[in-house]
Image (spheres, rainbow, N blue to C red):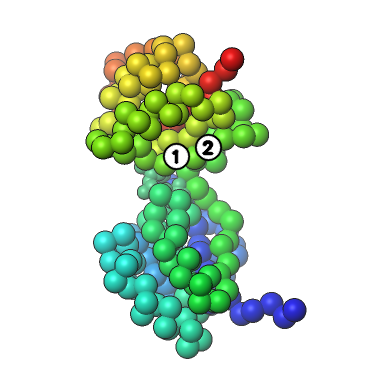
Amino acid sequence: MDKKVTSLYIVPTPIGNLSDITLRSLEVLRSVDGILAEDTRQSSLLLRHYQIQKPLQSFHSFNEHRAVNAIIERLSKGEILALVSDAGTPGISDPGFLLVRECVKAGLAVECLPGPTAFVPALIKSGLPCDRFVFEGFLPHKKGRQTALKRLAEEDRTIVLYESPMRLVKTLDQLREFFGPARTVSVSRELTKIYEETVTGSVEEVLAHFTAHEPRGEIVIIIDGKKD
Ligand code: SAM
């Protein structure tokens, strides 16, 4: 069967270090008819850095439901577009799923280029088992938070969470409550950036560290799975 021409490219972008973009991602961004971007201002900085000039259209969680039909129509007429988010891989705690689902339904070919995403380096450098893991993204802030924590406390695979610096200490405090103070946890912040830091230890130790040193920047939490 002949391979269909790709209509939509999902293009991962750096999570901090601008050099972390693949040659193929740059080729694709140079070749498409237009780029859908979570934040057009943020993406234009990256595109300017690589001297890429393309029409940009905003595509974010507040307009994706409204925008998706018109985009499918353009792709069906033969336009080729790329989707980028502010950082990392679109669809991973970022807009992307809805558009890809509609492309699949419409029989349009989607290609997702491999590239940066924050949880992979955090998981690998944690030293915790990475043969089986569960990605949970951001925990709910209010409703459903306690239920999620109770469920995850029983999980035997390594757990991956995204977190904001403002909420890190509160979350570690709740991990101590729900998972116990001895559970191993690894917090990676500012991956690929100047102030990259990974702190690994018991929940008690890591909580003490971030209580003494106010957390800043972007954060991934890796939690050891429950052991018998
Ligand atoms: N699409 C992205 C990906 O593929 O990882 C995730 C986008 S999500 C809106 C943003 C969250 O990813 C941040 O709050 C943080 O938890 C994590 N993150 C992004 N960049 C990071 C970095 N350089 N270091 C640590 N965590 C990062």
Q: Secondary structure at mark 1?
A: strand
Residue at x-position 28% and y-position 66%: 63
Residue 195 visible (yes or no): no
User: Does label 2 point to a residue whose CB lies under 8 Å from ligand 1?
Assistant: no
**Residue located beneath label 1 in the image:** 136
Left-right relation of 10 to 162: right
Q: Residue extending furthest bottom?
A: 77
Instruction: Out of 153 and 28, give the one closest to the viewer.
Output: 153
Left-right relation of 141 to 25: left
Place of residue 217 in the rendered image (x, y in percent of width and height, measured from the top left): 33, 37
Question: CA separation, marks 2 and 1?
Answer: 6 Å
Q: Are marks 2 and 1 in contact (CB under 8 Å)?
A: yes
Up the image or down, 151 lies above or below 74; here it is above
Up the image or down, 23 lies above or below 213; here it is below
Q: Amino acid at mark 2?
A: Val
Query: Residue 141: which quarter of the image?
Result: top left
Q: Amino acid at mark 1?
A: Glu
**Residue located beneath label 2 in the image:** 134
Locate the N terminus by quadrant: bottom right
Q: Residues within 10 Å of mark 1 (few under 14, many from 20)?
A: some
Residue at x-position 33% and y-position 66%: 64
Up the image or down, 187 lies above or below 7; here it is above
Place of residue 79 in the rendered image (x, y in percent of width and height, measured from the top left): 48, 83
Q: Secondary structure at mark 2?
A: strand
Place of residue 99 in the rendered image (x, y in percent of width and height, measured from the top left): 43, 67
Left-right relation of 95 to 227: left
Residue at x-position 25% and y-position 32%: 166
Ligand 1 position by quadrant: top left
